[in-house]
Amino acid sequence: MPAEVPDTVPGARRMGSGVAEPEHYRLPERLDPYWAGAWTASPGGSAVAWGGRHWERRLAAAADPEARAALVAAERQAVAAALSARRRRGALFLLAALQSWGALRFAQAAVLTGEPAVRGRRGPVPALEEAGLVQIGRVVTVGRGVPGLRLLRLDGCGPFERLDEMISFREWMAATGGLPWGRALPADRHSVLSAELSLRAAESSPLAAILGERQCNLAEFFGAPAGKTRSDALWVRSDGLCIHVELVASADRRAQAKLVHRIEMVRADPTRSNVVLFVGAASPSERRRERIHKDLRDAMVRATAHSPDAADTDVAQRVAWIRWEDWFPSPGVMTAWPRTLRVHSPSGPPGARWETLDLADPFAVPAGHPLPGRLGGYQRLAALPPWQRRASEDDFVEELIAAAGMESPYLRLEGRPFGRTDGKRAVVDLPAGPAAVR
């Protein structure tokens, strides 16, 4: 059991926030979804009821050429309305945030986009929902009559091919990071909690970038041993250290195998530029919560205690543990630990394995040998909160082309083309469209 207990600071607003606007969605004013009781461990549990009927329209028109042509025209009109001059900026930032994080609360979307009106009638959500690009859902708990949290996500059956026709290559790249528009992620609770924890860490500490699950393909950081797995979130320090966040809510065999797998990836990492942070996030209504967290900590100790040599000591310093309540012990209360990203590490001697470690401190946790240019690429993504974006409209495309080893901005026709095509290659009209996402 980690020995040191953080001092609490009643009233999270004393800690300040890195968000300049929208002020009413800053950390002290936002609901803590972990303590809100939206998801319960009671019999029947909780689920999210998602709206949206665009897939029904597509299914009904599939067998009728005339109906299909009419639907395509209607889709183009609805997407064009969602990307009108008044809505375009907010719409693209919102789509980028949902592309990265999967599911978000409205308040989280407002902070990530920097658009206070994201949930209002003049905001981008109504038009994007009408166009079939986003869905609105509500957390439903069995036996509870009180309406739950409202969430947003991309509509996996939406007309994203119409969207691609109407945005520039620069806008598409900033919104997606070069990945296909994503379908819904399997765990809405993990998406919402990882987004909230990441936002709170970014508001409280000097992190340079935070990204959601879709930008967290572990094979890009650890190579082949990672397989096709992704972490729940990625935090990047200004010196390039990557902190891979894994929320764990159970201690079953599958969860412990996942934990061991992540630690083995850290052990095999030649760059020493990656840290894995496990966050205990069992539901507060779970009666076995403390037992679950203890079992996970014990599994971490076993996985990092193969030998006493320097290599394994280094591995233990790049594996960390924290419980949600260590940073946010109750609604509206925050400890001082998020300011330095203080966590527990199983790097101590036998009998006192758990030590505290500040992940924000480059001397306590050196960055190793991170890949050059990675942070600059992340900071050009529209999914980042406004205070972390560093996109430059002038050099983004030129750097992208140079990094790809191309002399001109042409794309091979694999999947959807962008811009016009001569039948062999897609020609990207870079000046086309309104101003790029900044």
Image: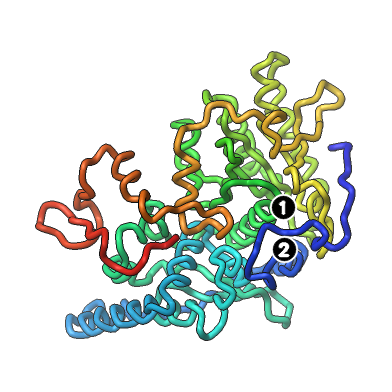
Quadrant where the C terminus sits is bottom left
Please tell me whether residue 330 is drawn above or below residue 209 in the rendered image.
below
The residue carrying mark 2 is: 27
Task: Answer yes or no: is residue 114 visible.
Answer: yes
**Can you tell which mark lies on residue 86?**
none
Q: As shown in the figure, which amino acid type bears the numbered disc 1?
A: Ser
**Can you tell which mark lies on residue 204?**
1
Q: Residue furthest front?
A: 394
| Mark positioned earlier in the residue sequence (2 or 1) | 2
- The front one of 297 and 205 is 205
Numbered disc 2: secondary structure: helix
Give x and y (percent) for residue 401: 29, 44
Numbered disc 1: secondary structure: helix
Give me the residue at 56% from left, 45% from top: 231
Q: CA distance from mark 2 to mark 1?
A: 9 Å
Give me the residue at 57% from left, 63% from top: 112
